[in-house]
Structure formats: structure tokens, C-alpha cells
Image (spheres, rainbow, N blue to C red):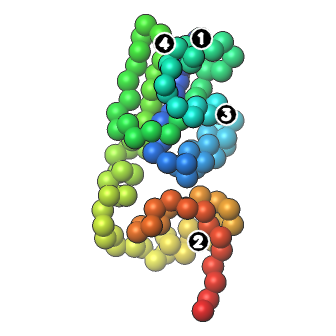
Amino acid sequence: MAQYANGKIIFSVESEGRREALQEVLARKKIYPTFLPNLDDLSLISNCDQDHLFLTIGSSEQGFINTQDEIAFITENELFGRSIIRRRRESKQTINSDLLIRSLAELTPGKPVVHLEHGVGRYAGLTTH
């Protein structure tokens, strides 16, 4: 990021839930990107003097660097590795019960979650029937 101290960096994730999850991760490092609802006009980004970090929702699998406008576009594949995308696309997985229990203990109502079959949603708590 030091190379783009005066440039713009755009983080791209695939869904609203992934956006919230990445914002939480970045906030822990005191990084607060501005949300971009779309990328229709990249000139708005390059002309923005105040903000240097942006976050948008898109389905790009690979980022790019625009050296002329000093814009780096970074996808979640590049941030977290291709294993995240691969895991989501697999239909069946073996689940480690120890890891599952530890993950459930970390959940609080309202947090974004990813369900293997139903996709992204918000954790509302556990109930028994």
C-alpha cells in the first residue's frame, strides 16, 4: 500500500455479507474504506482528493493496477486466496466439529454468516424444537 500512498485502492467483494465481514477485518486494523455502490464512473474515484480506500461489491475474480490513474483494484480472491472461492463452490464438505463449535461460540446475533447451502445471511441465534 505504501506504493499507492497518493493513489486509490479499491477492495472488491462478492456480496453484502462479505462486504460487512471485510469491513470488520479492516476496522480491526483501523482501516475504514469508503463504500462505493457501483463502479460506473472510475473518474469520480480518481478525482476524489479525500478518500484513498474504497470498498465495492462485484464479481471480479482478478484485480488490476491502473498506473496512469494510480488505482489498484484488489479482489477478495487476492486478499484471502483462492481457497475461499473454491470452498464456497464445493457442494459437500467434511466439517470439523471442533472448529464448528468454536465458530458458534464466536457468533453474536446480527453478524454476517455464510451457510453452505443457503449462502450469506445474518445470524439470529440458535433455537431448539
The earlier-in-sequence mark between 4 and 3 is 3
Q: Which residue is mark 1?
A: 47
Q: Which residue is mark 2?
A: 104
| Mark 4 surroundings within 10 Å by alpha-carbon count, few (fewer than 14), some (14 through 19), many (20 or more) | some
What's the distance in space between the residues labelled 4 and 1, CA to CA?
A: 11 Å
Q: Which residue is mark 4?
A: 70
Q: Residue furthest top?
A: 68
Q: In the shown orientation, is residue 29 left or right of residue 1? A: right
Q: Residue at x 42, y 73 (%)?
A: 96
What's the distance in space between the residues labelled 4 and 3, CA to CA?
A: 19 Å
What's the distance in space between the residues labelled 3 and 1, CA to CA?
A: 19 Å
| Mark 1 surroundings within 10 Å by alpha-carbon count, few (fewer than 14), some (14 through 19), many (20 or more) | few
Nearer to us: label 4 or label 1:
1
Q: Which residue is mark 3?
A: 32
Percent coordinates x, y for residue 25 in the rendering: 60, 45
Q: Residue at x 64, y 30 (%)?
A: 34
| SS state under label 1 | loop
| SS state under label 3 | loop
Q: Is residue 120 above or below residue 3?
A: below
Nearer to us: label 3 or label 1:
1
Nearer to us: label 3 or label 2:
3
| SS state under label 4 | loop
Percent coordinates x, y for residue 101 in the rendering: 55, 75
Question: Do residues under tags 3 and 1 come within 8 Å of each other at their CB atoms?
Answer: no
What's the distance in space between the residues labelled 3 and 2, CA to CA?
A: 27 Å
The earlier-in-sequence mark between 4 and 2 is 4
Three-letter amino acid code at the position of disc 1 = Asn
Q: In the shown orientation, is residue 23 left or right of residue 10? A: right
| Mark 3 surroundings within 10 Å by alpha-carbon count, few (fewer than 14), some (14 through 19), many (20 or more) | some
